[in-house]
Amino acid sequence: MTSVAVAMAGTIVAVTPRRAGRRLGAGNACAVFESGKFVGPAKVAFAAEIVRSNEAIMEQPGLAHEDPYGAAWLVVLKPDDWEAAKRLLTPGTDVAEPYRELMREADFEGCGS
């Protein structure tokens, strides 16, 4: 979850993370988001087991807007193969330009203050 994605989705009305103990394959959803503009999955890039899920965000979906990088975490994963999983993750420094392009394409001016 990012502040840009949350802002573009509109008001998040529900977030349903998958439960701890569930196994996920690459490309499976670890959570589902619902807003006035969007209903869709948050997908994982690698096979893993969910170790913990954030119950608080189910009760308070507004956390997605208030604290997308902190209190609004979704799940804690234990990858089946950490070395392979690590190669699929994108460093934060590589994310900025693709987000700028997405914002340009969507004519999205920003997240506000």
Image (cartoon, rainbow, N blue to C red):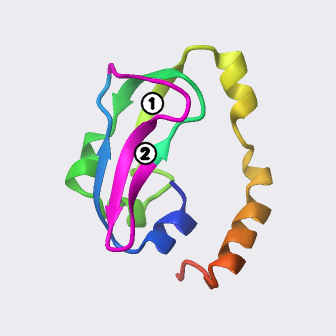
Residue at x-position 32% and y-position 61%: 34
Segment colored magenta: 21-41
Indicate the position of residue 68 as horizontal and vertical percent values. Answer: 47, 57
Q: Amino acid at mark 2?
A: Trp
Please give the residue where the numbered disc 2 appears in the rendered image.
73
Label 1 and label 2: CA atoms lie apart by: 8 Å
Indicate the position of residue 18 as horizontal and vertical percent values. Answer: 32, 35
- The crowding category of the residue bearing disc 2, from other C-alpha atoms within 10 Å (few below 14, some 14 to 19, many at least 20), is some
**Cβ atoms at labels 1 and 2 below 8 Å apart:** yes
Residue at x-position 56% and y-position 14%: 80
Left or right of 16? Residue 85 is right
Residue at x-position 35% and y-position 73%: 11
Q: Would you place residue 96 above or below residue 46 in this image?
A: below
- Dot 2 lies on which element? loop
Please give the residue where the numbered disc 1 appears in the rendered image.
76
Q: As drawn, which residue projects farthest toward the left?
A: 59
Indicate the position of residue 97 as horizontal and vertical percent values. Answer: 79, 64
Left or right of 43? Residue 36 is left
Q: Is residue 39 magenta?
A: yes
